[in-house]
Structure formats: C-alpha cells, structure tokens
Amino acid sequence: MQNTDNHTDKKKVAFYTLGCKLNYSETSTIGRMFENKGYQKVEFNQKPDIFIINTCSVTENADKKCKKIVKEAQKINPDGYVTIIGCYAQLKPQEIASIEGVDAVLGAAEKFQLIDLLDGFVKEPSQTQAKVFNKNIEEAIAYHTSYSLNDRTRTFLKVQDGCDYPCSYCTIPLARGASRSDSIDNIVKAAQEIAASGVKEIVLTGVNIGDFGLQNGKRVASFLDLIKALDEVEGINRFRISSIEPNLLTDEIIAFVAQSKRFVPHFHIPLQSGSNKVLGLMKRRYKRELYIDRVQKIKSLMPDCCIGVDVIVGHPGETDEAFLESYQFLNELPISYLHVFTYSERENTHALSIKPVVPQNKRAERSKMLHILSDKKKRAFYESQLGKHFEVLFEEDIENGQMQGFTENYVRVTAKYDPLLINETKQVHLVEINAEMLVEVQELENEYENHTH
C-alpha cells in the first residue's frame, strides 16, 4: 500500500553509499522502504528533496568523503534535506552534526527507523544544528534483513552484522555493535525473493560472516548450516562468500563448497599481516601457520579456486623486518589478488598505544610494493586459467562494444557485446589476457543453455 499523505506524496529521495558491500545492501533496503511509503527514488543529481548519505569510517578518507558529498548535495538542491547514516554517523555524530548543510544524523540503532523518526523530512527554519538520533552502540541489537536489488547482475545479501573481535586497529565493533545474525529461514526467504527478481548471483555479506548464528548472544546455528540451506535455493546460479576470517573457515566449510551445487570456488580471507609478531599486536585470532593451512586445504580440493587476501600495511609495530617477512609470506602463497589497506589512526582503538609508529611515507611505500605484488599474483592466476573452460555470468556494463563478466572462480572476462547474454551464464574457453588485464574468451558452440538448474 502506498502512503499518499501530503507530506510524503511524490517527495524525491536520493541515496549515496560509501564503503562496503554491507552498506550497499542496507542502502538498497532503506530505498525500498521509502518507495513503499510513496517516495520517488531518483539519482543524486536529479534535484531530490531528501539526500540520504550512508557513511563508512574504515579510513580517515571516508570522513572527508562524507563532507564532500554533503557539499555536493547542497549545490544540487540548497533546500534538500540531508540525512547522514552509517558507521561514521555512529562514531562521530556531533562532528557530523556540525557540518554545514546536514539536517539529521542517525546512528546504527536508528537508521532503519529514519522515515518514522524524521517525520516528513521538513527543514525547520529555527533549527541551528542537525538533529541527532544516536543511542549507545550497546543498544544496536535489532537485526534488519537487507539486500541490494536492481543495481547490478549480482546482489549483496546481508546475513550477519556487528563483530565481537576487538582487533586493535578497528572501530567496527564501536560502529556496528555486537555480532548478531538473521535466522536461516529469513535468509532463505530473502534469497528466494532475489531469485524471483531474476538475479543469478548472490554475494553473502556481513561484518564477520563466519561468526554467523548468534541471536541475542546465543549461538543457534553455524555458517555451515546456512550455506547448506542456501545451496538448495532454486533459481540462483551462484552464491559467493564475500569475506571470512581464517580461524572461522573450517575444513567442513571448505569441503562443502568444493562439492556444492551453487557455491563458487572463490574465497576472500583476511590475513592483515604475514608476521606473527604483527598479528599479535593486531589482536588477530590466528597465526600465519593456520593461514597457510587454510590456503593449502582449499587448493588441494579446488586447484582453480580464486583466493583474495586483505592486508594492512603500516600498523604500529610493523618494523621493516616484519613487513618484509609479510611480503615474502604473501609472495610464496598460491593466492590470486590482494586488497591492500594503509593503516590509519582511529580514535578509541588499542593500536594508538602501540609503538613505534610507522611514518606515512613508509606506509605509502609498503602499500605500493603490495599493489605491485597483487598485480603480479592476479596475472599469474589468470595465466594459470588460460585454455580452460568456465561458465561466465555476463553483466550489463557495455564499453566500446564489449561486455564483461566473471567466471565462477572470479576471472574477469571480456567478450563482444550480445544483448542476449546480459545476466545469462555461458560456457566459454579462456583464450588470452589483454592489455586491460581482462581475459578474452571464445564461446563454446552448442554448449550454451540458460542454466537455471
């Protein structure tokens, strides 16, 4: 039922998302809540009446980006109502409230209630500072099922929120609260809704998804239970696991993915450092030996599996020796690519008390070295896949008459544009790597079928 109250009737709302896949899934869900209430969803530059900016606070840069987007919103519509939600809004509500042009700030516990809390999104002339709705993070205990839709060929489905791991560099537990999960029934139902919309691939996302199964502090299920249930969902060709901690990636999960119908051979496993000394300073819950073990286990069961790795450079206490040890460790591992993060100081984190602090120029130098290593790893992985046959899910981003897509094991391919292939899976032969680091393919004749299992 559409609400046609005068104050919401045809009001235009636009969204901007900073940060992770989890934020995208939540923005998309909040967008559907607005549409169900009779608001019209528009692009950011279409002079909306309401701007909703979903923020991240993983790096210092994210804070600066938020300010920049507020400025842009004011240019587009000086009378627009600007609302800030997300991690930065939970961590620094007063700092955001003082940004010129911001009308409201909502923390983690309030963001899904913003339509009710900001009745009609009416600017009040007498209001000198933004309204702030921000409970203590301990009160962010509700779980909100979220997924992205209509944005792309694949959908991000949130299965877990919050984190109980106090890593020394991280503010996420302060921004998102304790670990909590949806029920398996709710997630399966959401996956079925996504399948009904025609999407073929679902990426499972969360803050610490391997910790799936906590409800009100009690463990009621495991991540393995969840993926077994999702593997039975008809209409979805592929499930991808976005990121899972090495200490939570069990032999059973790896073995299940290796023989599953719908889970693809692609893992993203945060390492953060290849030095046990630095892992200890970071308060990570494993040593490098466990990481090697996980990678070897995956490769023994799925030799073509793609393995992505998160690494932080420049964490306090990372000496030159520790960095080189980390670099060497990564160089020798059979992994496929790196996501490199440069450490940045965050308030209220343990890392601020660790010495020595790594100078900024060293952080930048180390980051550059790992980016080059990542390119090398990716090329080596792609080369190892040439000559093999895979199924590609083609996307609708068309550039210069070419379309792109991913194989199940996350090789990005390019092919001549064919409108019939958009959002379809097609058997291909990987031929060669082009100058843009995309793999050119040949279609396999007579093998094409619309795989809906």
Image (cartoon, grey):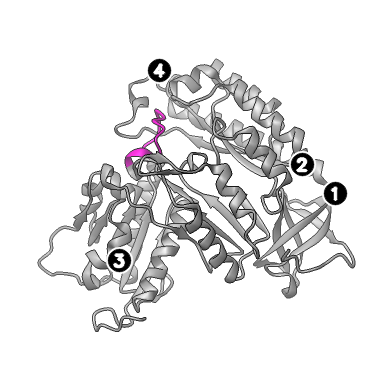
CA neighbours of label 4 inside 10 A, class few (<14), some (14 to 19), many (20+): few
Kindly identify the amino acid type of the residue bearing the numbered disc 3: Gln
Which residues fall within the magenta stretch? 163-174
Residue at 28% across, 78% down: 8
Which numbered disc covers residue 354?
none
Kindly identify the amino acid type of the residue bearing the numbered disc 2: Asp
Q: Position of residue 138 (x, y in %)?
A: 27, 42
Residue at 42% across, 61% down: 27
Callout 1 secondary element: loop
Kindly identify the amino acid type of the residue bearing the numbered disc 4: Pro
Q: Nearer the viewer, residue 203 or 229?
A: 229
Which numbered disc covers residue 356?
4
**Distance between the alpha carbons at the discs numbered 4 and 3:** 42 Å
Which numbered disc covers residue 388?
1
- Name which of mark 3 and mark 1 comes first in the sequence: 3
Kindly identify the amino acid type of the residue bearing the numbered disc 1: Lys
- Name which of mark 1 and mark 4 comes first in the sequence: 4
Q: Which residue is mark 2?
A: 304
Quadrant in the rendering for residue 372: top right
Q: Nearer the viewer, residue 129 or 172?
A: 172
Can the viewer see residue 141? yes
Q: Position of residue 79 (x, y in %)?
A: 25, 72
Q: Which residue is mark 3?
A: 74
**Distance between the alpha carbons at the discs numbered 3 and 1:** 52 Å
**Distance between the alpha carbons at the discs numbered 2 and 3:** 49 Å
- Name which of mark 2 and mark 3 comes first in the sequence: 3
